[in-house]
Amino acid sequence: MGSLFSSFRSRAGPNVSAEAQSGSQIIAPVLTNNTITGGVHFLHNAHGFTFDRPHSETTQTSATRSLIFKHKTRICSEYRYVTEYNSLPGERVLLSERYTQPLILQRHRDQKEREEELRSSGEDFQQVLSSRSSDKSVHLNSLFNPDNHGISPSAVILQGNSGNGKTLTVQKILMDWASDKLYKERFDIVFHLKCKEINRIPGRKSLVEILSYSCSLTPDQISQILQQSAEKMLFIIDGFDELKLTQEIYYMSPHTDVIQKAPAEVTLCALLRGHILPESFLLVTTRSTAVDTLSELLKGPQSFTEIMGFSEKGVEEYFQKFFQDEQLFRRAYTFVKTNENLFTSCSIPVICWIICTTIKERFRVGADVTSGLETTTSIYVDFVSTLLKHHCQGLSQSVPSLLRSLGQLAERGMLEQQVLLDENTVYETVSDPVANPFLCKFLFKRRIRQETMFSFMHLSFQEFFTALYCVMDEEESQRKLSQLIRWGSSNFAAVVQFAFGLLNKDVRHTLRKTLGLLVHPNTQALLEEWILKEIQDKNYYCGTLYILHCLYELHEEDFVIKVMESWKSISGYADFLRRTDCWALLYCCQCCQSIEQLDLLGCSGLTSEKLMMILPVFPKFKKILLPLEDPPVSDFVALMCALTRRQTLNSQEVGVISRDGKCIVCRDEQSICKELSRIFINPPWHHDPAGSLHSLSLTLPCSELTNISGIKLFQIFHHNYSDALMLIPCSFSKLKKMEISVDCLTERWCVWTLQIIQNCPSLTEIKVDAYILLEGGIKILQRSHTRPACVMRVEGLVCHKQSQKCTDYNSLSCNEKVMIHLSSMGFSMENLRKPLFFN
C-alpha cells in the first residue's frame, strides 16, 4: 500500500502542496478488482484517479457510458431553453427559436480592416461583413479541424464583443453534442464551466469538485469519466474575461492532478495551461480585452477565432425565428431594413433581440410598427442598460462615473478623428478598460513588436457616448453642445443627432431609472432654439436632411409640428439618399398639415424602393420634385397607379427625374390634368431613324385617370423608340391634348401625328415643337388637313435642305422660325422672327 501511495505522489509531481499530500486530504487508496488490469496501475480513492496509460488502451465501461448518458440527458433538458433578459420567473423560450449561426472568422484582422469595420454602416457595413464571410469563416463543426499544416488545435479561443452571442453559441454547441448532432465521434464528454460562477466558488477546490458545481454528477462520478476519456474530453470555459485572477496563478507550484485542491481560479488556470489533463481539449470564450492574458495562460497548439456578429443573412434568419409568423416577420424585417442605423446595429445579436422584442410588443398591442417605434438613440440606451446589468462583473466604479469616463474617451477620439485609440490614452481616462464591456482591445504587429489599441464596438457607439457625455450635467452640456453647433462639422452630425435623441422624455426617464443619469431639460431648449434659428436663417450646415434626423431622434411631436409649420420648402442635398433619410422625412412630414414644396433633386440614390417609402406623405406638398434611378416595370406601374388613382396625390405638381433624363409630371388632380406625363427620352445629340423625341405631354380629364393602365403607361413612357406613340390612341380613350418635342420634323413624324389625329376621336389639340422643320415634312402637312374639331400647331426653324436624317446641324440652312397651323380647313404658316443662318 505504501509503494502505491508513493507511486501516486511521484506521478502527481514533486511540487504537490503539503495539503494535497496529507492524509487528512487524501483518503488512503483502496485496491479494487479493477485497480490492476493488464499490468497497468490505477490509483482509486474517494476523490478521483490518476492513470498512466493512453486512452487508446482504455475502453468505457457500461457504468461510465451510463454516467455520460445521464450528463447528456441533463444538458438536453436544461440547455434546450433560453432565459431572456426580460423573462419573468418561469418564462423561457426554445434555443432553436433564438440561436442563429453568427459569422465566425478564424484569423486576426489588420488595422486597416478594423477601421473599415468600425467606420462603415448600412449597406457598406453589410458588404464588409460579406467580404469577411468569404474569407476563412468557419462553422461550429470545424472549430477543431486541422490547420493548413495538418495540425489540430488543443485549445480554441473564441473571441467576441459583449452581446455578440458567445454564451448562446456555447449553449448551442453543448446542446448539439448532447443530442449527438455535433462532435459525436470527436468528444466522449463535454463539460461547461462558467467563469462568472467559478468566481463565487468558496475555498479551495479540486477540478472534479469544480466540475460538479456545473453539472449533475458527483466528484466520484466525474473522476470515473475522466479516467476513461482523457483524449476525447472537451472543456468549454465561458467568459474568461470575467474570471477574477489573482497573483497566485503565477506563483503556485504546478497543479497537475484532478483531485488536488487550490483556489478555484488557480485550479482552472492549471487546466488551461495543460498541467491537469494535458490530453484534453479546450474551447474558451472571452472578450477581446482579455485575449492576450488568455493566450499566455493557454496551452498549445492554439487556434484563434472571433465572432463578428450577424451577417445580413443572419439578421434575416434571426427575425424569421423570432417572429415565426411569416407575415409578422416580413413586416418587422422590412421595417428595420429601411433604417440603416438600426440594421447596422442588428449585427450585434443583443441589439437584434432588443429591436425584435420592441417590435413584437407593438404587434401584441395592435400598434403600427412604424408609429412611435423607439428611435436609434433609445435602442442604444437599452443596449447600454442591458450590458451594464448582465455583462459586467465587479465594476470598480459607479455607473455614472463609468459612463462619464467612457464619454471623455469617446469625445477625445472624435476630436482627433480616431476610432482606434492608443493604450496610454485609454488607461489615462478609463480606470479598468479590461473589465469594460463597451471597449474592444486589439493587438497589431508593428515590425518586431506588438502594439495594443482599443476601440468602441463601432463608431456609432463612440458617437453615442460622446453625446451622452455632452448632456450628463446642465452646465457642461450647455457649453459642449454649443461648441458642437459652432464647429459645424459633419463629423459631429451623428453626435448632435444622438444628443437630440437623449433629450426625448421617454429616453430621459430610462436614463434616470436604469443608469442614474439626469439630463436637464434646459439642454433641450438650447437645441430646439438652434433648430428654429437654422430654419429661419436657412443656414443648414449639414443640410435639410440633417435637421429632419435631429427631429426624428427627438421624437417630440409637438415640437416637430412647430418646426414643420415654419418650413416653407424642404430641399435635400446629399451625395447619396439613404433609407434612413427617407424614414426621417416620412416621420417629420406626417406631423405637418401642408407644405409648399419637397425638392430632392439634389439627392442621388432615390430608388423606387425609397420612393415608395415616402409616397404616403405626397399629399402634404403642393409641389414635389424627385430623382428616380431606373425603376423596374413593377415599381413604375405601382407608382403611376398610386399617383393616378388618388391614393396619395393631392399635389398640384409632382416631378420625377431619372438618370437617363426621363421626367414625369402630374398636375392638379382636382380639375383637368394639364400635364399628366412629360418624358425626355433622348438627349438632343442622339438620333433614332425618325428624329429624336424629347418630350411628350398628354392632357385628359381626371375621370380618365382611374382607368389608365400602368402597364400601358410604362410601355409608352419607357420605350426609347418613337413607335411607342402609336400606343396612345388605344391607351387613352378620352385624350384631349398632346404635345411632343422633337429634333427634326421629318416626313415620318408628320405621318405619325396625322395618324394619331385620325385614330383618336377625343383629341382636340396637338402641338409639335421641333428644333428644325425639314422641307419633306412641311410638304406632307401642306397636302393634309385634320378632322373637324381638332387643330395641329407646329413650331420650329424652317430648313431648305432635303436631308431627312438631321445628323449635322451645321450643314443645315435654316432661314426663319415659323408656326404652322393645320385644321380641317387646311394648311397655313406664319413667320415668328427674322431669318437665322447656321452655315
Image (cartoon, rainbow, N blue to C red):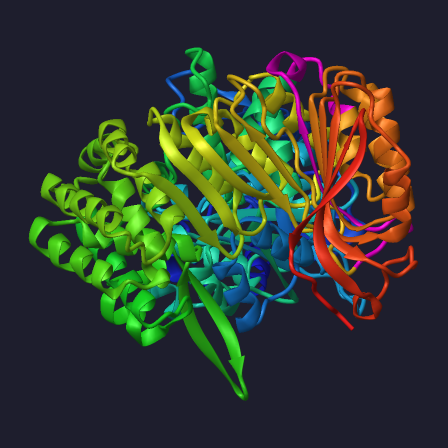
Say above or below: 758 vs 121: above
Question: Does the stretch in magenta take in 222?
Answer: no
x and y percent of residue 8 in the render?
57, 58
- In the displayed structure, 169 sits above or below 74; it is below
Q: In which quarter of the image is residue 760?
A: top right
Quarter of the figure with residue 75: top right
Q: Measuring 76% from the left and 51% from the top, which residue is drawn there?
A: 682
Residue 705, given in percent of the width and then of the height, sits at 65, 17
Between 102 and 145, the residue placed more toward the observer is: 102
Looking at the image, is 721 positioned above or below residue 419? above
Q: In which quarter of the image is the C terminus?
A: bottom right
Which one is in front, 456 or 263?
Answer: 456
Question: Where does the magenta region start and end?
Answer: 686-711
Kindly give the residue lying farthest to the bottom in the view shown.
448
User: Which residue sits at x=85%, y=29%?
Assistant: 785
- Number of numbered labels in the structure image: 0
From the viewer's perspective, tell me whether residue 646 is left or right of residue 365.
right
Closer to us: 838 or 17? 838
Locate residue 121 relative to residue 305 in the image: left or right: left
- Is residue 707 magenta-colored? yes
Q: Residue at x 37, y 74 (%)?
A: 422
Residue 413 visible here: yes
Counting from the top left corner in percent of width and height, residue 598 is at 44, 39
x, y percentage for residue 831?
Answer: 68, 50
Say whether residue 367 is left or right of residue 32. left
Residue at position x 21%, y 63% from top? 486
Nearest the camera: 738 or 158?
738
- Above or below 632: residue 241: below
Residue 258 visible somewhere in the drawing = no
